[in-house]
Amino acid sequence: MIGILRKGVARSGYEIRHYFRQGDSLFFTFLFPLVMLLIFSVAFSQTTFGAPGEEISAAAYYLPGMVAAGVLLSGLQNMSIDIAMEKGDGTLKRLGGTPLSPVSYFIGKLGQVLVTGILQSALLIVVAVVAFGVELPDEPEKWVTFAWVFLLGVTTCALLGIALSAIPRSGRSATAVVIPIVLILQFVSGVYIAFSTLPEWLQNVASLFPLKWLAQGMRAVFLPDGFEVAEVGESWDLAGIAIVCGIWLVAGLVLARVTFRWIRKDG
Amino acid sequence: MNEPVVRVQNLRKMYRGGAEALRDLSFEIARGETFALLGPNGAGKSTTIEILEGYRDRSGGEVSVLGVDPVRGGLDWKARLGIVLQNTGEAPTASVREQLQHFAGFYPNPRDVDEVIEAVGLTAKAKASIRKLSGGQRRRVDVALGIIGRPELLFLDEPTTGFDPEARRQFWDLIRRLQDEGTTILLTTHYLDEAAELSSRAGIVAGGVMAAIGPITELGGAEARVPIVRWREKGKVREERTDAPAALVAQLAATGEPEGLEVIRPSLEDIYLSFVGRDAAEVTA
């Protein structure tokens, strides 16, 4: 058991080094939310958001959505494409022939997602503060909320990513399968477009998926309290976040456990 | 101790869709032995080796590898194997040393990383990213990864593809050292000189069955090794197989110098070709 954990930690280090050596994942997963934050902040630099007396800048308004998008990208997109590619290019076949436990392999992946996710959020927050003067919350309970929403979100997204990696038939088709899912989720979950402006039926559909809840959680952390009335039910609904993400976490764990194979057996 | 390291009995493999890769294959490999599996492309060599490695399920027959059915082989069992697959796969961004150090960590009693790098002749490239290596150099990394765990049984599926002659010699030396340490080896190769050089016994797979099996020097039986005397008579090529070629040549010479006289002792290649058919062999060459 200790061996499995130790190998998992060693695997994390290996995975993280590999992650930062690959230009494409670095851009499309790691820096993408930052690029979007820069675009929105610059495009709407003359606009303010929120009720009179509580106006905030575009950078402050979009920061929570981009942090949530980062969690989705670092977790689900990175994980599903990465594993599908590794399945296609023979990496998993090679590992499957060694005494490495699949559990260690997944600890390695989760470690990579966690570390890159934290760095990504930190980078977003630092740029928002330094370049756009966004004010951060100073209540400790908001940072507690941030911590659990982030950890729950990143773990859920990573597990769903593992499950999703079983769908593409080849490494090359992985991007084609995963990117549209991720992109549509971002548009309907209140990342780029304010959730309250979507028609009710679309809100209901989006509410089935975890990203809507993650974005809501991040808004609860980073937006002033006055913004709570703009939410569905005029509440941040933190319990709802925990429940929906919790259900997806369990579903992701079961699916990942059931679907994962080192190689596609030919029967 | 007398238990063979690999035992395959009446192995059968049907692919989904009905294609039959293996019909009835049987062979054994004793501890410390190097066994070469020969045969044309598509004969089922890789299918066989991947069944033994636990990558593929079988349709019938009995298989035992280190006393374990590969279908049920756990991590402890995998720790005793070394696998060099036929396809290298995508090269990682890691350097040669990083990759070997990382894989060494999977095994309970790995070899020294730098010694392995030295043994495959990549010391000068130890710090280079595997992505930046040539095809032959990457193949040497595969071999290094296959032996890093100090395996009892080493699978080598066409290990020297893409090697230059010098690298091939170096590889042969490495295999001889592994043999001296008692490693059991299953080798598939298209190079018959390599099989003759490294293995004590060989089997020729053709059409999903073992067409011939035995010590390299006796492969195909005495029949296949009978010398051939060939000459031309009135513009037509004549051929006769005889255990006493000198007597036949003397008899022919009695009536004058025979035209285009040759005495041919079948090489391993000739014997191989007689089993798999010349057409199939030309495709693989």
Image (spheres, coloured by chain):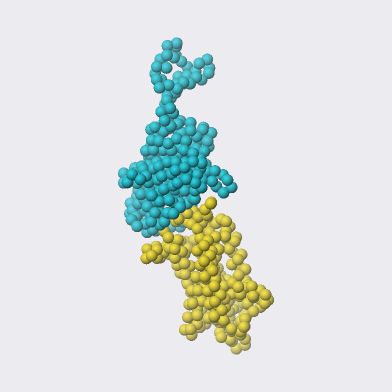
In the image shown, does A1 or B164 lie closer to the viewer? A1
The picture places residue B209, in percent across and down from the top left corner, at 49, 39
From the viewer's side, name the closer residue of B203 and B87.
B203
Task: Determine the colour of chain B.
Answer: cyan
Q: Kindly identify the residue that appears in the image at 51 percent across and 76 percent down.
A: A149
| Residue B16 horizontal side relative to residue B182, left or right | right
In this rendering, does residue B199 appear at all?
A: yes
Can residue A130 be seen in this snapshot?
A: no
Q: In the image, residue A47 lies at what x, y percent? A: 62, 80
Residue drawn at 33 percent across, 51 percent down: B115
Q: Is residue B101 left or right of residue B131?
A: left
**A68 or B33, nearer to the observer:** B33
Vertical placement of residue A114 versus B136, above or below = below
Above-or-below relation of B5 to A19: above
- Identify the image quadrant of residue A238: bottom right
Quick check: A72 left or right of A104?
A: right
Question: What is chain A's hue in the picture?
Answer: yellow
In the rendered image of this protein, does residue A224 appear above or below residue B218? Answer: below
Q: Position of residue B161 (x, y in %)?
A: 45, 43
Q: Residue at x 34, y 55 (%)?
A: B110
Q: Residue furthest top?
A: B255
* Rendered location of residue B21, percent (x, y): 52, 43
State the count of labels.
Answer: 0
- Residue at screen point 57% across, 60% down: A167
Relative to the observer, which residue lies in front, B133 or B233? B233
Q: Relative to residue B232, is residue A64 depicted above or below?
A: below
